[in-house]
């Protein structure tokens, strides 16, 4: 089970840090990531970090967002800086991959991020 938190209202140019806490170990989860879903739009992957440490980012957030993963603490954080109004969305923490039983996918509840201009 994943629990996302840290959203809120911030002015453009500000920063927020989203946190995702897992009830169990994330060490074996292949990829952990954060998605965003703006009103009327499809959910979109913003940032992901693989178990080996490789990170990927949506082009629009490169240089502004940083994803980090702490397997010892079972947390995944998303540091968001230089926020823009277009970053306004509900953000979801997720974990996914493949194991001996097949594909798996976990989702946390969303946390609202609102960036005012």
Image: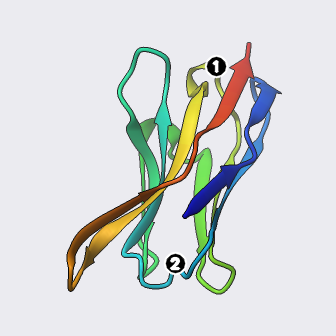
Q: Is residue 69 left or right of residue 53?
A: right
Element assignment for label 2: loop
Indicate whether 83 appears above or below 19. Answer: above
Percent across and percent down for residue 4 are: 65, 52
Classify residue 75 by image quadrant: bottom right
Element assignment for label 1: helix
Give the numbered dot on residue 6.
Answer: none
Classify residue 16 by image quadrant: top right
Percent across and percent down for residue 3 are: 64, 56
Estimate how packed mark 1 is, as few (under 14), some (14 to 19) or many (20 or more) residues with alpha carbons within 10 Å.
some
Residue at the (49%, 84%) spot, across then down: 27
Q: Are marks 2 and 1 in contact (CB under 8 Å)?
A: no
For the residue pair 46 and 14, the one nearer the viewer reads as 46
Give the Cα distance between marks 2 and 1.
32 Å
Estimate how packed mark 2 is, as few (under 14), some (14 to 19) or many (20 or more) residues with alpha carbons within 10 Å.
many
Percent across and percent down for residue 80 are: 67, 45
Classify residue 41 by image quadrant: top left
Residue at the (63%, 77%) spot, across then down: 74
Q: Which residue is mark 2?
A: 26
Q: Which residue is mark 1?
A: 85
For the residue pair 14 and 63, the one nearer the viewer reads as 14
Indicate whether 55 appears above or below 11. Answer: below
Q: Quadrant of the N terminus?
A: bottom right
């Amino acid at each position: 089970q994943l629990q996302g938190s840290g959203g809120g209202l911030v002015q453009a140019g500000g920063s927020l840090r989203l946190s995702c806490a897992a009830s169990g170990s994330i060490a074996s989860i292949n990829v952990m990531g954060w998605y965003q879903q703006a009103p009327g739009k499809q959910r979109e992957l913003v940032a992901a970090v693989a178990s080996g440490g490789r990170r990927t980012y949506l082009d629009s957030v490169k240089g502004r967002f940083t994803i980090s993963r702490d397997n010892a603490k079972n947390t995944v954080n998303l540091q968001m800086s230089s926020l823009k109004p277009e970053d306004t969305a509900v953000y979801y923490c997720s974990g996914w991959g493949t194991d001996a039983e097949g594909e798996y996918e976990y989702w946390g509840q969303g946390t609202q991020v609102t960036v005012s201009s």
